[in-house]
Image: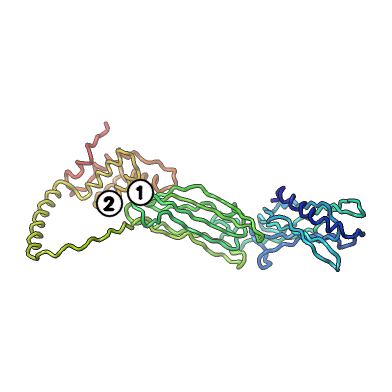
């Protein structure tokens, strides 16, 4: 895009060059004294595909005294475009005569296949001729550009995958803290950065979907930035997520593949946002010094006594509490507090300790669909609502396998109140 600062830079460059130009003797203009050309550059001189960068180099050579100048660019209706830096003026010599050289570089991006013509650029020059000023317009010849149609799967017209033509592409994946160290409910910030050269930031893909069952993800804002270089624009996009494990077991967050077209090698390639393990690593506990060796007879007697006491206690405990009772109490508590994440974690713990009970809950026509609705609300696309957790906890409390301990559900962290 042409900015006022670029125009001021061109005028300033001419003002600095004016003493040299004015020092040259005035003479009548001849053919070839004022020339303006436009050339198109693509990697390997290949026909570009839609939305692939093409560099237009506008080059002028003028053997005349120039006081003012203004380059008028055609509308470029079939192209997106951006100017790469300021106009450049320099001295040159043609057939022993001093001349001024002008150059502007514009990156254009064809929007579709076909044969197009770039209309002439017009350089409006105010010349000094025998002490008088006159205005001339120097036009470049029309420039034909052929844009090839993509052959094969994907491509510019396909909805998926995103069409990404670039000279190179890099992916950076950063976590704070590392995902393997997370425990149930603890958050981490994931930041993924894509950087590509040869396109602008709006051409980079939208934020990918980061979704795996058992992992809660909350998407943050997307930041896009375009940096202009003499070789073309360099685009960067940054995606952020807050990630929390929703179950106590380690979960693999799947890799995400990003296809892109290498405009230099003219082949499709793949970049990857890598897979990571969420949770599962516990903090190391420093081991203390080993206990002193005990008498083998004393250890045997203590072991027999402990076994007897433990056997009695286990029988008593077996009569009073089922293996999943702590998880059932946590389930009832999460239902009263209407905490869906804690509720789901308690369901997972019940499934680990009492698989038969969890299978009965999932198969029951009254509770199975409500558990599925909870899963969809936590791990779906955000359109599902969380069911009534207090009511669901009461319904689950009334369901237990026939061989379950009769009073295992009685002490669910407080009395259960029935509606009605």
Q: Tags 2 and 1 in contact by the CB under 8 Å rule?
A: no
Q: Nearer the viewer, residue 136 or 204?
A: 136
Q: CA distance from mark 2 to mark 1?
A: 18 Å
N-terminal of the pair, mark 2 or mark 1, is 1
**Residue 386 visible:** yes
Q: Nearer the viewer, residue 274 or 228?
A: 228
Q: Position of residue 148 (x, y in %)?
A: 66, 62
Q: Residue at x 88, y 60 (%)?
A: 24
SS for dot 1: loop
Q: Position of residue 48 (x, y in %)?
A: 66, 62
**In the image, is 367 to the left or to the right of 83?**
left
Specify the quadrant of the image occupied by residue 33.
bottom right
SS for dot 2: helix
Q: Which residue is mark 2?
A: 351
Total numbered labels: 2
**In the image, is 187 to the left or to the right of 238?**
left
Q: Nearer the viewer, residue 105 or 378?
A: 105
Q: Position of residue 64 (x, y in %)?
A: 86, 58
Residue at the extreme top of the image, as rendered:
420
Q: Indicate which label's residue lies in the foreground, 2 or 1.
A: 1
**Residue 359 visible:** no
Q: Residue at x 48, y 47 (%)?
A: 220
Q: Position of residue 23 (x, y in %)?
A: 87, 58
Q: Which residue is mark 1?
A: 185
Residue 401, label in figure: none
Here the colouring is rainbow
Classed neighbour count for the residue bearing mark 2: other residues with Cα under 10 Å, few (<14), some (14–19), many (≥20) = some
């Amino acid at each position: 895009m042409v900015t006022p600062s670029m125009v001021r830079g061109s005028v300033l460059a001419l003002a600095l060059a004016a003493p040299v130009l004015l020092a040259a003797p005035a003479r009548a203009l001849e053919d070839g004294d004022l020339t303006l050309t436009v050339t198109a550059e693509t990697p390997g001189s290949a026909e570009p595909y839609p939305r692939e960068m093409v560099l237009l180099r506008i080059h002028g050579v003028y053997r005349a005294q120039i006081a003012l100048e203004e380059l008028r660019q055609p509308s470029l209706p079939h192209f997106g475009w951006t100017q790469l830096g300021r106009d450049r003026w320099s001295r040159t010599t043609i057939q022993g005569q001093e001349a001024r050289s002008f150059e502007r570089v514009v990156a254009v991006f064809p929007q579709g296949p076909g044969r197009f013509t770039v209309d002439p650029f017009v350089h409006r020059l105010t010349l000094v001729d025998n002490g008088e000023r006159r205005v001339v317009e120097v036009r470049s010849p029309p420039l034909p550009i052929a844009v090839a149609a993509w052959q094969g799967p994907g491509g510019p017209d396909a909805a998926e995958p995103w069409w990404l033509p670039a000279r190179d592409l890099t992916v950076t994946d950063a976590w704070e803290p590392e995902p393997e160290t997370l425990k149930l409910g603890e958050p981490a910030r994931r930041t993924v950065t894509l950087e590509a050269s040869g396109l602008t930031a709006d051409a980079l893909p939208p934020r990918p979907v980061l979704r795996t069952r058992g992992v809660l993800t909350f998407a943050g804002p997307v930041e896009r930035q375009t940096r202009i270089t003499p070789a073309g624009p360099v685009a960067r996009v940054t995606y952020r997520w807050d990630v929390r494990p929703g179950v106590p077991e380690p979960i693999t967050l799947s890799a995400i593949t990003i296809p892109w077209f290498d405009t230099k090698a003219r082949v499709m390639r793949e970049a990857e946002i890598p897979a990571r393990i969420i949770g599962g690593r516990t903090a190391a506990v420093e081991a203390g010094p080993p206990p002193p060796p005990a008498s083998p007879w004393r250890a045997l007697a203590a072991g027999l006594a402990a076994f007897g006491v433990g056997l009695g206690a286990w029988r008593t405990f077996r009569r009073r509490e089922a293996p999943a009772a702590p998880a059932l109490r946590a389930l009832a508590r999460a239902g009263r507090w209407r905490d869906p994440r804690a509720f789901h974690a308690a369901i997972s713990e019940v499934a680990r300790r009492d698989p038969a009970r969890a299978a009965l809950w999932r198969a029951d026509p009254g509770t199975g669909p409500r558990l599925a609705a909870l899963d969809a609300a936590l791990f779906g696309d955000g359109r599902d609502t969380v069911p009534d957790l207090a009511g669901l906890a009461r319904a689950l409390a009334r369901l237990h396998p026939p061989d379950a301990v009769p009073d295992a559900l009685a002490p669910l962290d407080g009395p259960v109140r029935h509606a009605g």
